[in-house]
Amino acid sequence: DWYWAEDVLAYDNARLPQALIAAGARLGDGEMVRDGLRCLEWYGGQLDLEGPCLRLVGHRGRRRGEPRTDTGDEQPLDAAALVEAEVEAFVVTGDEAHARHAVHAFEWFLGRNRLQQSVYDFATGGCHDGLGESTLNGNEGAESTLAYLQALLALDAAGLQATLPG
């Protein structure tokens, strides 16, 4: 089943269920929260969130009915969005599964990804611009570094910590 508001999945899409969860919680609308949680669970399933490593949608996106491919560049912005959505779900529900998912998504930055390479650069404090088909993008742009820091701060604010894989 395709449980999504649009016919295409694109990077940064975790912001949609995050917005439903946050708005529903603040408005006291339990149905909106439940819809956001269901969307987030479905979206996480599309990214193999329960698997050994997160597989982000990538910059090419994916249309309804298309199989997942690993040809699009995975971007830090997308991982950060998922971290923050799962943190929001954890804060609103107290469900530890969302805490685990937030940490798992964050570990994408630390090497728990399909290339098994750290996207965060411990030497420079910057963050690579993503994963290509078979290589790490060598650039360390501000958007990517800020995405990493924003995800890290979201984990910290919720009292969660990530560990280096392996």
Image: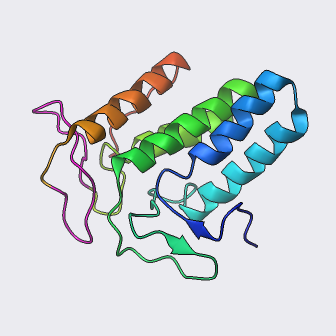
User: With 66 as the anchor, is 166 left or right in this view?
Assistant: left
Displayed quadrant of residue 73: bottom left
User: With 158 as the anchor, is 144 left or right in this view?
Assistant: left
Residue at position x 73%, y 26% in the image: 92
Residue 97 visible in the displayed image:
no
Residue 125, position as x, y percentages in the image = 17, 30
Residue at position x 28%, y 62% in the image: 115
Q: Residue furthest bottom?
A: 66
Residue 18, position as x, y percentages in the image = 64, 39
Q: Is residue 54 above or below residue 141?
A: below
Displayed quadrant of residue 136: bottom left
Residue at position x 36%, y 51% in the image: 112
Residue 78, position as x, y percentages in the image = 44, 49
Q: Is residue 15 above or below residue 151?
A: below
Residue at position x 67%, y 24% in the image: 91
In reply to whether residue 124 is colored magenta, the answer given is yes
Displayed quadrant of residue 151: top left
Q: Is residue 160 above or below residue 97?
A: above
Magenta stretch: dominant secondary structure: loop
| The N terminus - image quarter | bottom right
Viewer-side residue, 89 vs 11:
11
User: With 26 as the anchor, is 133 left or right in this view?
Assistant: left
Residue 164 visible in the displayed image:
yes
Residue 128, position as x, y percentages in the image = 21, 47
In reply to whether residue 128 is colored magenta, the answer given is yes
Magenta span covers which residues?
A: 117-137
